């Protein structure tokens, strides 16, 4: 991603409604679907500036890697962990270690060889280990946001399952999420296309709106992992070796 995108994400990830509620979704999926042992070994692949690391530490011992040097330094300072350089699919650090859970949170869409990347991470799973993936959903939602973040693709449940299968993985659970705000996002993106607006859609909204959006999105934690939501702006999947 471009430097300004990394900087904007670093500034927003602690309090912006999308990042806060997404952490709620990640935590919910781990608790309901990962079946982790006590003091699990956990890896976050592409941890950015470290916004998810504290959450993951609730569940065990955490390692992380990140490609971007500045983001990696920020994650190290924030977490106190030794965040390593790494890149998918061929430069995954922590040789010889295996994990109960590997998190890949809105990273796979940034990597052109997605099958090879999942294969590389699958090789680091312990027997029964889980790979928890979140990605942006539905190709028809492609927008300037995807361009600015250097995405290669958006996914559906069907094509993410196909990519996983090619990587030797099976889906044990998948669901769309950020469902309640889906109609509003469709309308907002339609207006942007009609007006030709290129304004970024990840700026911090006013406090009252940020709180409202967080609570609407966050309410999905009560059902995510129990049922499969039919549509959403994002897609989450729990994978294991086939």
Image (cartoon, rainbow, N blue to C red):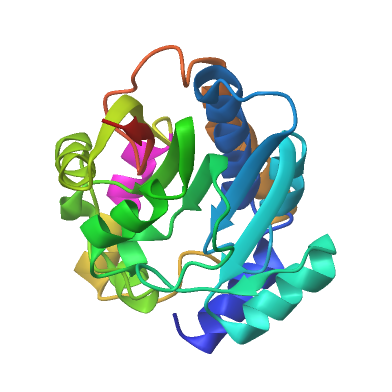
Q: Where is residue 187 drawn, in percent x and y?
A: 29, 48
Q: Residue at x 65, y 23 (%)?
A: 37
Residue 215 on image: x %, y %: 63, 32
Q: Is residue 155 magenta?
A: no
The residue lying at 52 percent from left, 47 percent from top is 103
Q: Which secondary structure class fits the magenta region best?
A: helix
Q: Quadrant of residue 112?
A: bottom left
- Reply above or below: 71 against 164: below
Residue 239 appears in view:
yes
Q: Which residues are magenta?
A: 181-188
Q: Is residue 108 left or right of residue 209?
A: left
Depicted 113 relative to depicted 235: above or below: below
Residue at 52% across, 73% down? 86
Query: In the image, is 78 to the left or to the right of 175?
Result: right
Q: Quadrant of residue 237?
A: top left
> Percent from the top left, x then y, of residue 3?
54, 87
Q: Residue furthest top?
A: 226
Frontmost residue, 5 versus 50:
50
The outermost residue toward the front is 96
Q: Quadrant of the N terminus?
A: bottom left
Residue 184 on the magenta segment: yes
Instruction: Report whether 50 appears left or right of 221.
Output: right
Residue 47 drawn above or below residue 1: above
């Amino acid at each position: 991603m471009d430097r300004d995108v990394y900087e904007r994400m670093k500034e927003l990830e602690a309090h912006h409604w999308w990042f806060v509620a997404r952490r709620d979704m990640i935590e919910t999926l781990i608790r309901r679907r990962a079946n982790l042992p006590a003091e699990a070994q956990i890896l976050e692949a592409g941890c950015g500036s470290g916004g998810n690391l504290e959450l993951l530490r609730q569940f065990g011992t955490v390692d992380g890697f990140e490609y971007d040097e500045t983001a990696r330094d920020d994650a190290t300072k924030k977490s106190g962990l030794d965040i390593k350089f790494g890149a998918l699919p061929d430069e995954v650090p922590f040789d010889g270690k295996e994990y109960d859970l590997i998190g890949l949170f809105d990273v796979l869409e940034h990597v052109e060889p997605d099958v090879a990347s999942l294969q590389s991470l699958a090789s680091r799973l312990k027997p029964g280990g889980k790979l928890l993936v979140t990605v942006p959903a539905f190709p028809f939602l492609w927008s300037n946001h995807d361009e600015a973040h250097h995405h290669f693709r958006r996914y559906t449940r069907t094509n993410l399952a196909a990519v996983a299968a090619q990587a030797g993985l099976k889906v044990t659970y998948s669901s769309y999420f950020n469902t309640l705000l889906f109609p509003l996002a469709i309308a907002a993106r339609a207006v942007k296309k009609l007006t030709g607006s290129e304004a970024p859609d990840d700026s911090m909204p006013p406090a009252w709106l940020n709180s409202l959006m967080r609570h609407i999105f966050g309410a999905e934690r009560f059902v995510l992992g129990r049922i499969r939501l039919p549509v959403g702006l994002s897609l989450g999947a729990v994978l294991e070796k086939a």
